[in-house]
Image (cartoon, rainbow, N blue to C red):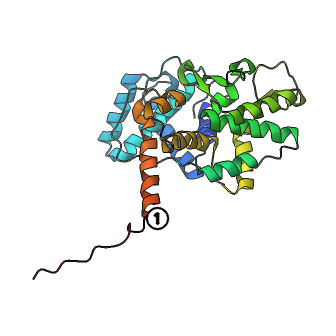
Amino acid sequence: MLRKGPNRDLVREFLTYIQVEKGLSRNTLQSYARDIAKLHSWAETNHKPVEKLDRKDLREWIARMSRDGLAPSSISRSVSAARGFFNFLMLDGHVKRHPAEDIHTPQRYSRLPKFLSEDEMERLLLAPDIKTDIGVRDRAMIEVLYAAGLRVSELCGLRTHDVKLDAALLTCHGKGSKERQIPIGKSAVHWLQRYLSIRKQFGNEAKPELFLHRGHALSRQTAWSIIKTHAATAGVPDISPHTLRHSFGTHLMQHGADSRSVQALLGHSDISTTEIYTHITDLHMRKAYDRFHPRARVRSPRVSKG
């Protein structure tokens, strides 16, 4: 297992990170762990620390898997896991370059991401008990996640000076230190104002991070736990903070936003990543049509040949 320093298990930290960011199931996490273990084993065989692997090494690793007879889908999954692992190492400052960033393998299919309906989203927003300080904080946190389509790491990284309530804007620090400004609606502004008025109740008001928990910056794990708790109350279990990001993109597209605008708001570097929401909305419209159009399921009578 990869370790850095006496008390660091970077593989375990990576698995915790993707569980929080994407809300992955136990089976999926185990699959990631097996794929990263394959990479680590290959690196050890070639007398290289896994964090020192470069683009050439990874191409040789892929070739090795191919020669060993692994199915293309298995290779694609392993490369995807490696790409996520190195992205995590780079974001947390363990490596300076991302050796797997431009290594791609054919994908047989893409799984459509999970998102909430607008009614489910409304129930989630109403779940926190706003009679309490914690409830106000949690409501503000959920409002911001949904209003701005943030990744959970971006939410936890928000600082108080990143919020411009008079202009209804957030400055977000995304992947690769990319900065973007995101407009937020009146509801998010209102709940941020309420939270900021009681923020001192969470201790250490001098901390620069916007959202606090017991005097410390809100962690990804705590944010994930908060979402899961309120989702259970709202009757929308098995979601993660990333589900709110998918809901943000999907709802914008369903209401007519163009994909380029959604791309900019989400901070996607590639428009193809954003276009997944087009597929979701197409599927949503198809289901709505099939359910509600009076002639959607009526078969035309066969015309007999006479």
Secondary structure found at label 1: helix
Residue 61: percent from left, percent from top: 38, 32
Can you say which quadrant of the picture contains the C terminus? bottom left
**Viewer-proximal residue among 202 and 131:** 131
At 54% from the left and 49% from the top, the residue drawn is 114
**Viewer-proximal residue among 254 and 283:** 254
Residue 156: percent from left, percent from top: 69, 29
Q: Amino acid at mark 1?
A: Arg
Q: Is residue 52 left or right of residue 62?
A: right
Q: Is residue 100 left or right of residue 187?
A: left
Can you say which quadrant of the picture contains the N terminus? top right
Would you identify the image quadrant in which residue 18 lies?
A: top right
Residue 15: percent from left, percent from top: 60, 39
Would you identify the image quadrant in which residue 46 lies?
A: top left
At 34% from the left and 29% from the top, the residue drawn is 60
**Viewer-proximal residue among 3 and 45:** 3
Residue assigned mark 1: 291
Would you identify the image quadrant in which residue 303 lies?
A: bottom left
Q: Is residue 204 left or right of residue 18?
A: right
Q: Residues within 10 Å of mark 1 (few under 14, many from 20)?
A: few
Q: How many labels, in total?
A: 1
Vertical position of residue 161 compared to residue 40: above or below: above
Vertical position of residue 216 compared to residue 235: above or below: above
Residue 155: percent from left, percent from top: 67, 30
At 65% from the left and 48% from the top, the residue drawn is 121
Q: Is residue 218 visible?
A: no
Looking at the image, which residue sits at the far front? 294
**Viewer-proximal residue among 19 and 302:** 302
